[in-house]
């Protein structure tokens, strides 16, 4: 039902826009002005009344994908074990992870006594482009072990009303991050 009402609203908007452009072209012809130039200007104005945020969202999204998104491994589980001899054997993990809260952390989980899985999200204020940073952190040394930065668009609740700002999330090496997360999560022995 919502989809049908959106289609009707878009059809009416398209109809009104065509009428406005047609009227502006006729007005320009009567006054001896360039009807093509005035028609294009009227069309652009009508387009930007509703879809003003599409082009800025696309530009910022592409820019963030090219400059901010990525995947970095600072220490593998093997390197971490070598730097912390004997510690991995003392750690315990559970299939049910504990929540971890801290300032600036959007979502957080304690994988074991040493390792945290943290997600931080930053959202743009003007255009609906956001950055999601996932970190695997050694909580004692306060060092990032693995980092993944993803880019997403759209605001929650606007999936139907502003669908043109919703683009496919860019998540580089998501499988690799999951692999390292599973390896760090299962360091040590399972709690009983």
Image (spheres, rainbow, N blue to C red):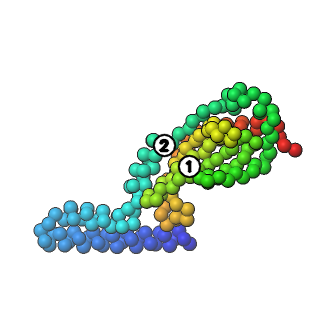
Q: Is residue 1 visible?
A: yes
Residue 64 higher or lower than 43, as above or below: above
Tell me which residue sits at (29%, 72%) in the image: 20
Relative to 65, 89 lies left or right: right
In the picture, the quarter occupied by the N terminus is bottom right
Image x and y of residue 84, in percent = 72, 30
Tell me which residue sits at (71%, 37%) in the image: 184
Tell me which residue sits at (71%, 26%) in the image: 82
Image x and y of residue 151, in percent = 52, 48
User: Mark 1 falls on what kind of element?
Assistant: strand
Relative to 70, 39 lies left or right: left
User: Mark 2 falls on what kind of element?
Assistant: loop
Q: Residue furthest front?
A: 141
Tell me which residue sits at (75%, 50%) in the image: 98
Q: Is residue 165 visible?
A: no
Image x and y of residue 180, in percent = 67, 37
* Crowding near the residue tagged with mark 1, few <14, some 14–19, many ≥20 C-alpha atoms within 10 Å: some
**Counting residues from the N terminus, which is met first, the one under dot 1 or under dot 2?**
2
Res 9 → quadrant:
bottom left
* Crowding near the residue tagged with mark 2, few <14, some 14–19, many ≥20 C-alpha atoms within 10 Å: few
Residue 132 circle label: 1
Residue 166 higher or lower than 25, as above or below: above
Residue 68 circle label: 2
In the picture, the quarter occupied by the C terminus is top right
Image x and y of residue 51, in percent = 39, 63
Q: Residue furthest right?
A: 192
Residue 124 higher or lower than 118, as above or below: below
């Amino acid at each position: 039902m919502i989809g049908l009402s959106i289609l009707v609203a878009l059809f009416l908007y398209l109809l009104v826009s065509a009428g406005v452009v047609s009227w502006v072209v006729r007005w320009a012809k009567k006054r001896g002005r360039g009807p093509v130039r005035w028609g294009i200007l009227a069309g652009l104005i009508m387009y930007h009344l509703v879809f003003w945020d599409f082009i800025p969202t696309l530009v910022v999204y592409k820019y963030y994908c090219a400059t901010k998104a990525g995947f970095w491994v600072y220490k593998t589980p093997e390197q971490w074990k070598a730097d912390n001899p004997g510690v991995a054997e003392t750690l315990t993990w559970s299939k049910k992870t504990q929540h971890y809260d801290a300032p600036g952390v959007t979502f957080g989980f304690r994988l074991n006594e040493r390792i945290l899985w943290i997600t931080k999200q930053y959202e743009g204020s003007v255009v609906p482009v956001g950055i999601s940073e996932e970190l695997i952190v050694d909580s004692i040394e306060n060092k990032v072990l693995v980092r993944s930065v993803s880019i997403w668009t759209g605001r929650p609740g606007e999936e139907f009303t502003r669908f043109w700002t919703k683009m496919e999330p860019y998540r580089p090496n998501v499988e690799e991050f999951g692999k390292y997360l599973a390896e760090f999560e299962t360091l040590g022995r399972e709690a009983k």
